Image: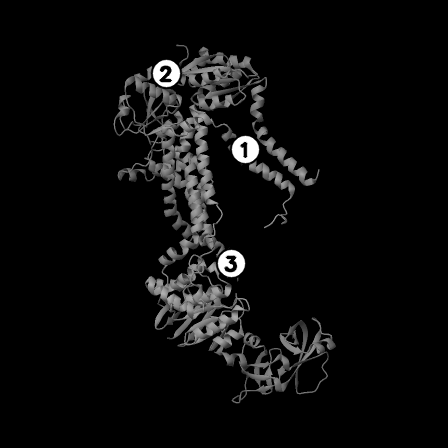
Amino acid sequence: MNRQAYSGVPRWIYALAVLAALVVVLPLFAMVARVNWASFLPLVTSESALSALGLSLRTSVASTVLCIVLGVPLALVLARGRFPLQGLLRSLVLLPLVLPPVVGGIALLYTFGRQGLLGRTLEFLGLQIAFSTTAVVLAQTFVALPFLVVSLEGALRTGGERYEAVAATLGASPGRVFRRVTLPLVLPGLASGAVLSFARSLGEFGATLTFAGSLQGVTRTLPLEIYLQRETDPDAAVALSLVLVAVAVAVVALAYRRPSGGALQTSTQRTTTAAAPGGNVA
Amino acid sequence: MKKGQKLAALLLAFLVAAPLAACGGGQATGNGGGTLTVLAAASLKASFTELAKTFETQHPGTTVTLSFAGSADLAGQINQGAPADVFASADTRNMEKLQEAGLVDGEPQVFATNTLAIAVPPGNTAGIRSFADLSKPGIRLVQCAKQVPCGAAAAAIEQKTGTDLAPVSEENSVTDVLGKVISGEADAGLVYITDVRSAAGQVEGVPFPEAASAVNSYPAAVLSNSRNSADARAFLNLLTSPEGQQVLAAAGFGSGRN
Amino acid sequence: MTFTFEAAVAERGFDVTLTVGPGETVAVMGPNGAGKSTLLSVIAGLLRPDSGRAELSGKALFDFSPGRSTWTPPHQRGTALLAQEPLLFPHLNALENVAFGPRSTGATMQQAKSEAARWLAEVEAQDLHERRPAELSGGQAQRVAVARALAADPALLLLDEPMAALDIHSAPLLRRLLKRVLTDRPAIIITHDVLDALMLADRVVILEKGRISEEGPTREVLERPRSKFAAGLAGLNLIPGNLTARGLETADGQTISGHVEDPSYAGGDLAAVAVFPPSAVSVFLDNAHGSPRNYFEVTITDLEPHGDLIRVRAGGLAADITPAASADLGLVPGLPVHFVVKAMAVAIYRA
């Protein structure tokens, strides 16, 4: 509120906080310091780099869309439904958050791979997933979906159920309640979840490498390109890493930007204070 | 000093010390008298594990510490000051890089060679018989990216034979190629003959004569910051000795001296 | 239109039978946790009862009587719910909020908006069309919520303590408004306030522990309460017991004499209550006083201001005395005293 406000944080906490910030910032800084600026532009605009960046952006958009299409219903069912083993399902769905991506890749391989659970069926249908861009999107969706589900389920839980009940008593069918009440109410949560999913998709490496392979223009996304360039051309790897950092920074900034006063940003907060007379209008 | 500050200082010291302590073991073995640290290309794992035991029997009191990774990774680590005595690379390029940086003591010795072979899943369902078969349409070929030694070798053969391969994936390491053949995702993979040997039972090997035109040399050298160069030299000697050559040959490597 | 309802929810110990006549407003009162909100939830279709059946204007809301299983989902019931909090949809402005009901039931955008405008005018919120809920005061928001509920044209309006979250300035305005719109409109209103019951309801139902303990025309219930809760609402003392020839005999054997208002009584035990106002109770430190009087040996639990008097609470009864008398007697919580009530001031009637 103002500079005189009492914060109550012990001074030694600041020392550790600075240390914590350094743990994150220092490596990034060190990397930026190693950028060979003279050759930066040619390196990041090389054919293979642009191809990798383009592929990364395309697949990340696709997997984000897939995350929204599949994640919204899942979050809704987890937040609103009541059924046996719900807790177990939630834990399982969140597993990719803590799973090493390589493990995810192996799991996907044994699902969609040629010898996998669904592989033969897919092959029979003429679909080959492994080594295709589809595999990249699948791998990214696998690791990114929990981010969307977590943030959306959080938003769904902080409010909405009572609005939905009121909407139903006003004559709105479940479909209309979903479209006109539930979705608009959780839009901020959905947006930040989608941005996080996009960011996670963009950074996906392990599962893609294990499951999708690495071929320029088809499956070699930017992280894979960086990994490959590192073998022979560290300068190129550093330059491309910087590009990825820049995109990530932009994405994070987008996700956590301060609400610009729009009603949608404030809607979830309002659910708890809606009844307070003269509540925070700003 | 106040209690809180003392605690903070303690934590800070811990945070700085913890990573150092974690890698302290490696440092000690690298510089100590009775230990020898060998950084070797991943394809050498089986042979070098055996040879390290032989070396330890021959030199009682000396412990050999082995670290396996891609040659480029290892060269990078040495460049960043990783303490080690011997470097065994799967190609000459990475060794040359270290030589240029002045990190190699003396002349590297080529102690083994490796040639490419085609690995196919058991049963060879795609019916691969020759190098030329790899370019048949519908064949799912996986190979190394040309940035890594096994990929460079494949590219050299391609060029010499005028074949145009269309792999579905270009992997970063030969083990990744092998993995995709083992899992049955790929119909064929271009790997080293030693890989086919080590994965016997999981893959079948299809040797091809064109491989002889791109033989990978494995050089080894004593590193200039070695604190145990006597043992390091002895280890190099073991590699080129009949005993060492026999172990390497058993793994599928070609003779070093050619 | 009539509304008939009987339902049981075993888990909550809820078992209620209720009817609402055409144009009738029923106030439901009772202590916290008595099942008032459960009642509205079951009616609105937000909670499924274990058994029972309900019908609104000839349409079954649910029917779980033996051998049947009929369930009408909330949006097809015509039972709009107005809660303690306005719960206006935060992403819609006032007009869009009110238009939500009509739009949901098939009106065109044009029709819904004009309907909404009409109802906003009805609740004196015609100048708030464009406002977002975040820009409304608590009272304004609740008025818009009333308009939204009415615009849905409910066959039965359910109000769950609509005034409870309002400040003392907004409540009277909304109460007047509700009085106007609830006339000739069937409604059930949950309230803690006797004033709401008196002003808005034709009938009051007292709900205690999931069951109806008392019901009747509002005035009658407040004048002649038969339950402790209703007596408390009316500000009266109530002692339950059995009617005997000499008066009312309590569970612990004390006989309370008073005016037996039941000419038809012909002897035999009959559940009854003795009711008297706190103002009729005198407080003494000893028991040396003439008859005919009722004595209660009690220990003071609380003293609290009540208008210009002091309300003395002791043994589940209340007495109103002047501050001077209280000071003279040196009343403090924990002090044993005698509550004395003239028989003339005690009404005894069947429970």
The residue singled out by tag 1 in the image is: A26
Task: Determine whether the residue tagged by mark 3 lies in a helix, strand or loop.
Answer: helix
Spot occupied by residue B60 in the image (x, y as percentages of width and height): 56, 16
The chain that hosts pointer 3 is A
The chain that hosts pointer 2 is B
Circle 2: residue type? Val
Above or below for C89 versus C279: above
The residue singled out by tag 3 in the image is: A273
From the image, which quarter does the C terminus of chain B lie in? top left
C-alpha separation, residue under disc 1 versus residue under disc 2: 43 Å
Residue shown at the point (65%, 35%) measured from the top left: B10
Circle 3: residue type? Thr
- Along the line of sight, the residue nearer the viewer: A225 or A43: A43
The residue singled out by tag 2 in the image is: B215
Task: Determine whether the residue tagged by mark 1 lies in a helix, strand or loop.
Answer: helix
Q: Specify the quadrant of the image occupied by residue C328.
A: bottom right
